[in-house]
Amino acid sequence: MNGSSEYSSATGLRIGIDVGGTNTDAVLMRGKDVLAYSKQATTPDVTSGVSSAIRSVLMQSSQDPAAIGSVMVGTTHFVNAFVQRRDLQEVAIIRVGLPMTSGILPLIDWPEELRDQIGEHIFMVGGGSYYTGQEYTPLDRQAVAKAAQTIAERGLQAVAVSAVFAPIRPDLETAVEQILREELNDIHITLSHQVGGIGLVERENAAIINATLHTLANKVVLALEHAMHALGLDAQLYLTQNDGTLMDTEAARQYPITTCAAGPTNSIRGAAFLTDDQDAIVVDIGGTTTDVGVLSKGFARETSDSFEMGGVRTNFNMPDVVSVGLGGGTVVHRLEAGQVVLGPESVGYKLSEEARVFGGSTLTTSDVAVFRGQLDLGSKALLNDLSVEQSELVARLAHQTVESAVDQLKTSAADIPVILVGGGSVLIDGDLKGASKVVRPEFGTVANAIGAAIAQVGGRVKQLLDYQAEGGRDAAIQKAIQQATENAVAAGAKIETVTVVDIEELPMPYMQTDAMDVRIRVVGDLNL
Amino acid sequence: MRIDNVEIIKDLARGAVLLGTGGGGDPYIGQLLLQQEVREGRSVEVISADSLADDALIVSVAGIGAPTVLVEHLQAKGICQQLLQKMEKQLGQRVDAIIPAEVGGLNSVIPLALGAQVGLPVVDGDGMGRAFPHIEMVTFSVYGNSACPMIIQNELGDTIVIEKASTNRKAEDIARVVAGSLGAMVYSALYPMSGKDAKNKAILGSISYCLEIGRGIRESRAQCTDPFEGLMSLLNRPDLDRYAKILFDGKIVDIQRETRDGWHFATVTMQGLEDSHDEFRLELQNEYLTAQRNGRTVCLVPDLIATLDRETAEPVTAEKLKYGQRLKVIGLSAAAMMRRPECLEVFGPRAFGLTEPFVPLEELSP
């Protein structure tokens, strides 16, 4: 094993892959150089698309598969499965909270069909903490052991554990895990403090979603490993997370939910890599939608607002992204009096059948781009009914759509660099209002796969800290940074490369202490 | 009116965010409490104040404390029921109905969940027709009712009874201190009053109004037209002495926030989407106090100001406002009673340290 990783470090060869809704993109990189890239159709099983993308970059570069050190995959497959209610498994839910919280039981706000699939295996047990970190009542260990028995009797294979103020007292949840491990063999356990922030209902929901995806995550990770093996690769496999960092397959099996928004994050990180900008707005124009996000100090800006996923309110970290219905396949509607409307529907991957330049009957944004000479695709002669006025109108609308999304994400009125990436980025050919410059980097169409290939390893801490009790602000923050660094190293980071990306402090009104909601994020290079 | 299904609960919560006028606490947890009751087969009847006997005993129940604690502790089943029993014991009389202190925000839904739990009706009315940060800022207080005896309890059963307070403002001050030492989130039974008091002193019809607003937004959105058209025709009813205006349509260009003495202060600056010289400004102290367009006041407390997503008309609390957000801001006239001089003294502009005298929304040009 040692020999193999030294070999791969020496060659530095790695493959980054982004599995999108339409395309699976791959890049082969050595150090900072892109050696080959490929776009393949995404397949329902994920793995065949990934296999053909890997095969393609290996062939283009004539590389020996055995020389590849690592493969990094970004995929939204798990979140899609949840949204489409596919491959979900039953989950036991243990909430440590009594005598508090009993007025609102788990799953209360979940759509009926999801409740049916998850089952209603709810165990409410005593325990929990005040915001100060002090327990209001000790953990009811007996109740947990009893729950374990019932879980065994019902043959359940996944458990979601949540505790009141677990972000401050994660030990309340790890104690439950210990008891369960003593009583149950071979059980998946998701602890809420690992997947969500303050807000018991949303954090518990995130834990349940994660637990219900556990079997699918196992299946997909195994399939990816087999596929790599079949291609002759002896590389380390990683999945990319919402924050643009990597996790190994063990962590991916454990926390599939943290991969759900990796796509936009990878585009933002890839854009940063391809340009010199560390602070910019990144516009990723795909086939159907445009994702606009914020590059801040080289990373994707996050949001911790609660949001709905597949009809369930939750609050884990996501990149702060605005999605609008504009892409290369977006349908152009021509109205009377020369007016036009864009989308929101798109022909998506059927562009080469349905677009006018390919003899189809649907006028798309790509057709207009061909008419205007921005794009060389199909037959321009098929567009003779289009007028210059109309095509200019379409271009102006596309620009306005992007400008408006960019403006929504800016934190100040000052102009900021805008980086255009993605397969549909040719649609924007002029300047953009609000942009200090518009950058169109080489390899921008596969920025997402590049973002996966260059992903680092992260660690984070999210806690309510009482500065007084911790010996002042500086001491409290230092301690939290140290904890985050340890987390990063445990996840595979080289300790000497670990740096702090983000320190966020949110004051807690009404509380009579110096309590602050502190979020710290560090990253480091992968220790290959 | 019976509240017995999830759709009506969500409509209520949506309306409560709008009437929360930027603050009042996100009613989401309250909504879930009520959903739990309905799921377990219970429901609550909202009754007109007219149907109350003059000597009936009516009590308010409210949550007081930090939103951050609420979203973790949620609510222990039965805590409000215990408060009610303690109040009955204190007064030696059975409670006949519950009345919300404020219809805006979280405290609109908590009394409804309690009503469902114990099978008591909830009076269609409240003490302000909106949200305010202090317990003395209610019409009941202005017209002579005492907040006391006021009972405060946390989830572990720790209980404080404020038997008497020299003023209702004093009761507020005591409650704040007590809430801190009881875990930063407590529940309170307060403002015991007679049926006659409720009829004469409450803002009547405010729960049905809240529901109407939430439902109106949902329905106009479903009709795929501009949801503001439907909403404004519902809100602006000069025939009922109710006025509403779209005060501004634009985007946020700056937010300054500050937490001072337990208050959330903020100044939100907006600009027109086309005309960046068209400037709009909102001042907030837990709830919105004033709206100014190009330096001219267009709406003043206690008239209501609400911020809504400009596409979906979903009401947005001030906590969630962000730079770049596109909003329509609407102004709503407060209930006529709220605009009387004696009321303005307690929750008019001066009560919040503003020097401008109150001018009704309909008399200010937008």
Image (tube, coloured by chain):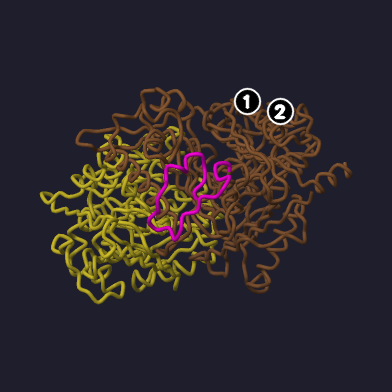
The relative height of residue B342 versus residue A366 in the rendered view (above or below) is: below
Q: Secondary structure at mark 2?
A: helix
x and y, in percent, of residue B23 in the image: 37, 58
**Are marks 1 and 2 in one subunit?**
yes
Q: Is residue B52 magenta?
A: no
Query: What color was chain A assigned in the picture?
Result: brown
Type of amino acid at the residue the image marks with label 1: Asp
The relative height of residue A380 versus residue A272 in the rendered view (above or below) is: above
x and y, in percent, of residue A224 in the image: 71, 31
Which residue does the numbered mark 2 point to in the structure image?
Answer: A223
| Label 1: chain letter | A
Type of amino acid at the residue the image marks with label 2: Ala
CB under 8 Å between discs 1 and 2? yes
Chain in yellow (letter): B
User: Mark 2: few, some, or many residues within 10 Å (few <14, many ≥20)?
Assistant: some
> Depth check: A251 or A279 in front?
A279
Mark toward the start of the polypeptide (1 vs 2): 1
Q: Tell me the residue at 61%/50% (across/down).
A: A243
Magenta residues, start to end: A420-446
Q: Quadrant of residue A70?
A: top right
| Label 2: chain letter | A
Which residue does the numbered mark 1 point to in the structure image?
Answer: A45
x and y, in percent, of residue A251 in the image: 71, 42
Direction from residue A260 to residue B268 in the image, left or right: left
Q: Is residue A422 magenta?
A: yes
